[in-house]
Image (cartoon, rainbow, N blue to C red):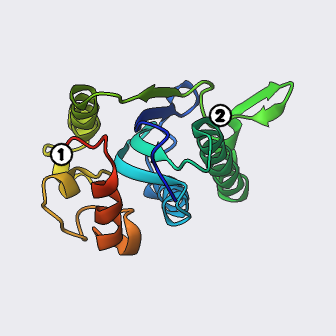
Amino acid sequence: MPFNSYFPDFFTAAILEWKLLLKPDKFKDILIESLRFLLNDNRVIIYAFVITNNHIHLIWQVSDAYKPTDVQHSFMKYTARVILEELRNNHQKVLALFEVNAKDRRYQIWERNPLSISLFSKNLFLQKLDYIHYNPVRAGLCTLPETYKYSSAAFFLMVINPGNSYHIMKDNAVGKEHQQRRKRQPFLFV
């Protein structure tokens, strides 16, 4: 699928009221699996990511076959549904923290209106890349970006250690296909 119509986007979504819902890895894994599906289905190219205890940052590019807002909405809706199911089945007390009783929903996982910024220049891309990778360091979750499990920092630093870094690239590694797709993109500045 072509990836020529849209610039990469810096995307941020936060858990409702910045609650620490994503602290247990099983909830981060739900996000990883959803991103892996979008990647394997050729809906997106994922350049960078980090998942902390209460939010996710991505640099991704949406395929020409989809609208960026549709992919974002789909990602957030699906992950919210799976997280709510886990909370209903195993964490009723935590579920109560997400009750909002709004007109259109009883529970809400994500803050409304996630941030999405088109990265139309090399400097902006690199600034957001750095911001993403140092986010867990600033949050006190690690001392070096490449040691944080739910980040692409190790990939960018070429310190690939599958036991220490969680990669959502195809085949759980830096696959040739992913590398080739990245090289074909005219806006990539590396």
Q: Residue at x 70, y 37 (%)?
A: 96
Q: Nearer the viewer, mark 2 or mark 1?
A: 1
Q: Position of residue 134 (x, y in %)?
A: 21, 36
Q: Secondary structure at mark 2?
A: loop
Q: Position of residue 87 (x, y in %)?
A: 66, 51
Marker disc for residue 8: none
- Pick whichever, 96 or 176, lies toward us: 176
- Amino acid carrying label 1: it is Val
Q: Residue at x 42, y 28 (%)?
A: 118
Q: CA distance from mark 2 to mark 1?
A: 43 Å
Taking the view exactly as shown, the residue that stands out farthest to the right is 103
Q: Is residue 155 above or below residue 7?
A: below
Q: Tell me if residue 139 can be seen.
A: no
Q: Position of residue 15 (x, y in %)?
A: 54, 34
Q: Is residue 22 above or below residue 127?
A: below
Marker disc for residue 190: 1
- Amino acid carrying label 2: it is Leu
Report the side of 178 relative to 26 (left or right).
Answer: left
Q: Position of residue 25 (x, y in %)?
A: 43, 56
Q: Tell me if residue 79 can be seen.
A: yes
Dot 2 surroundings within 10 Å: few (below 14), some, or many (20 or more)? some
Q: Which residue does the numbered mark 2 point to in the structure image? A: 97
